Image (cartoon, coloured by chain):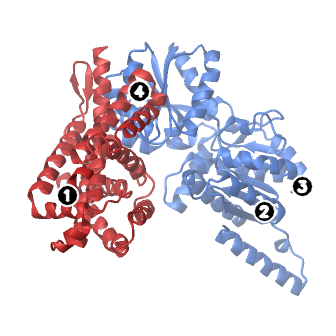
Amino acid sequence: MAGSWLQFVASGLTTGAIYALVALGFSIIYNASGAINFAQGEFVMIGGMSAVMLLALGLPLLVALPLAVLAAVIVALLVEKLAVEPARHAGTVTLIIITIGVAMFLRGLAQLLWGKGVHRLPAFSSEQPIEWLGATILPQSLWVMAGAALAVVALSWFYGRTLLGKAMRATSHNRTAAQLVGINTRGVLFASFGLAAGLGALGGVLIAPIAFTSYDAGIMLGLKGFAAAMLGGLGSFAGAVLGGLALGLLEGLGAGFVSSAYKDAIAFVVILAVLFLMPGGLLGGRGSERV
Amino acid sequence: MRFNTDTVNALRRSAMLLVGALLAIPGAWAQEPIRIGAFLSVTGPAAFLGDPELKTLELYVERLNAAGGVLGRKLQLVAYDDAGDAEKARTFAKRLLEQDKVDVVVGGSTTGTTMAVVPLMEQASTPFISLAGAVVIVEPVKKWVFKTPHTDRMACEKIFVDLQARKLSKVALISGSGGFDKSMRAECMKVASKYGIEFVADETYGATDTDMTTQLTKIKGSGAQAVLNAGFGQGPALVTRNFRQVGLTLPLYQSHGVASKEYIKLSGPAADGVRLPAAALLVSELLDGGDAQKPVVSGYSKAFEDKYKAEVSTFGGHAYDGLMLAVNAIKAAGSTDKAKVRDALEATKGYVGTGGVVNMSANDHMGLDLSAFRMLEIRNGDWTIAK
């Protein structure tokens, strides 16, 4: 039984790492604007689908992957310039609704451009599962986990040590005060969209060999990533990763020990319970202290 | 939404009537056309069904007209897009019956849109050939309702027959949460005992799940001799990959829902050895020369692929069968009298279509048997017919 127990954990960590990567993108934009970007899942999809298209054009993996991430960043920057920035004086709710519109638009565009088929990227390294004490995990899952870990470290460094990162944080705490000390708050939101999309697209490329990608893959990723970000605490990067892994593990263990039919229900009941007791999420709630 | 073809046809018709009236020359070409009504899910979530169906109907109405029409009259297709919405399907069906006054209706891409329209067709006493899968459409038999696609129950039975031949009886079932998946799961459970099949596991996964190793690990410990995945979309490809990942070596059966090259492509080498029931249309080049369906399926594949430069799907084939059944019935009835056409449809015997050989009767308005399915096995990334 030890083997199956471990397998449930491995399965949970695989999905959890995927959710974590998406959740990180939610936190970046939340930090810059206080808004939830519901097009985050679509950035992930654009990363995966662009990579599929570029590979089909005959480019090697090492060239296609950065180009795919770049494509998503360009799309995100355009979205910010054309859709989000003109509404910058509107409230957070307006911004959120705009991102929902953007998500639908991008999904429609992807359907026209790439069709409705489901696609898969080849695994980065071997396709041979790694076995350990009777449980198996795909090498690609390790890539996803490493990607999520690396992203957290890089983001912590960026927000804690660089001027642009600090400017972003200042903007999230108090936009007016940040403007008064000379921070270009418009530029901050612009950069945040690029950063979130780049990270999302990287995630999209990493997970496409395991979870496949299609024009509508962003819906599920967006929802689960958002749930993970909420669970971990919106705005906290460590929280996003923790929330993602916790959500994945809940699903994996729930399906393994209770019933696969109720695994989503189990996960969401736990999320509700956590948010009821800790409204800021596992690692959130520091917002009030920051003032 | 009205399609260009019927607008054009309507214009052409009015023009013809006008010219006919002016010259007062009654000729065969000025006769009322035979109107074929269709409501299909051309856009929306079921577009993968409706899109090839509409294309097929347009293609073959054009071809039949080029060949002189039916009973010396032209065919006219009146098609609407219900976008997969049952409410819209009802509205369009009403319009087909009341305004367009169609002679026969071919359509209903999904079971939902079909069932919403059944009462209207029964009331209007108009022959209706559905292109949707579920058994409920023809069971119990409804006087005016027929259908062309095989059912998921037949897919289950085809798989169970194959399991019996391999002397396997303990089966683990894994299915998705979608409508197709659930319906097939229920049908398989219903007929299992008839074939001495016992389910030792019954696992499910969500339509957008990305990892099924948990469910498969449970199946691994269930003592199953074979695994059956009732699924549709990308789920079955993930199941197939995870199946090999957790080291399962049991025979794996998939449903007809994944009978497309996309499934093989997504599953990669993990798909080797997987068996699934599929319509003859998908493997037209593998059929024996003596196979009755070979000329029909090769002819349809060629016509469709030449015109649209896209791979054929069984769904377009269902529309082909629907149209041909209607046309044959009109020919047999010698008129478009609705009651006579209905009787002719019910009397259809030995029609060889893309979905199989159709033998209708008063208590079978689908007319297919298990031979409509071929048991395929995937070998080296391609279909082979399982022996």
Looking at the rendered structure, the kind of residue marked 1 is Pro
Label 1, label 2: how many angstroms apart (C-alpha)?
53 Å
Pointer 3 chain: B
**Pointer 4 local density, CA inside 10 Å: few below 14, some 14–19, many at least 20:** many
Give yes or no for contact between labels 4 and 1 (Cβ–Cβ under 8 Å).
no
Label 3, label 1: how many angstroms apart (C-alpha)?
65 Å
Kindly identify which residue carries mark 2: B95
Callouts 3 and 2 on one subunit: yes
In this rendered view, identify the residue nearer to me: B387 or B344. B344
Q: Residue at x 38, y 63 (%)?
A: A92
**Pointer 1 local density, CA inside 10 Å: few below 14, some 14–19, many at least 20:** some
Looking at the rendered structure, the kind of residue marked 3 is Asp
Callouts 4 and 3 on one subunit: no
Please state which of the two labelled residues, at mark 4 or mark 2, is closer to the viewer.
Answer: 4
Q: Position of residue B38 (x, y in %)?
A: 71, 57
Q: Which mark is residue B337?
A: 3
Pointer 4 chain: A
Callouts 3 and 1 on one subunit: no
Label 3, label 2: how many angstroms apart (C-alpha)?
19 Å
Kindly identify which residue carries mark 1: A66
Please state which of the two labelled residues, at mark 3 or mark 1, is closer to the viewer.
Answer: 1
The hue used for chain A is: red
Kindly identify which residue carries mark 4: A255
Give yes or no for contact between labels 3 and 2 (Cβ–Cβ under 8 Å).
no
Return the disc, 3 or 2, that comes first in the chain's sequence.
2
Q: Position of residue A62 (x, y in %)?
A: 17, 53
**Pointer 3 local density, CA inside 10 Å: few below 14, some 14–19, many at least 20:** few
Callouts 1 and 2 on one subunit: no
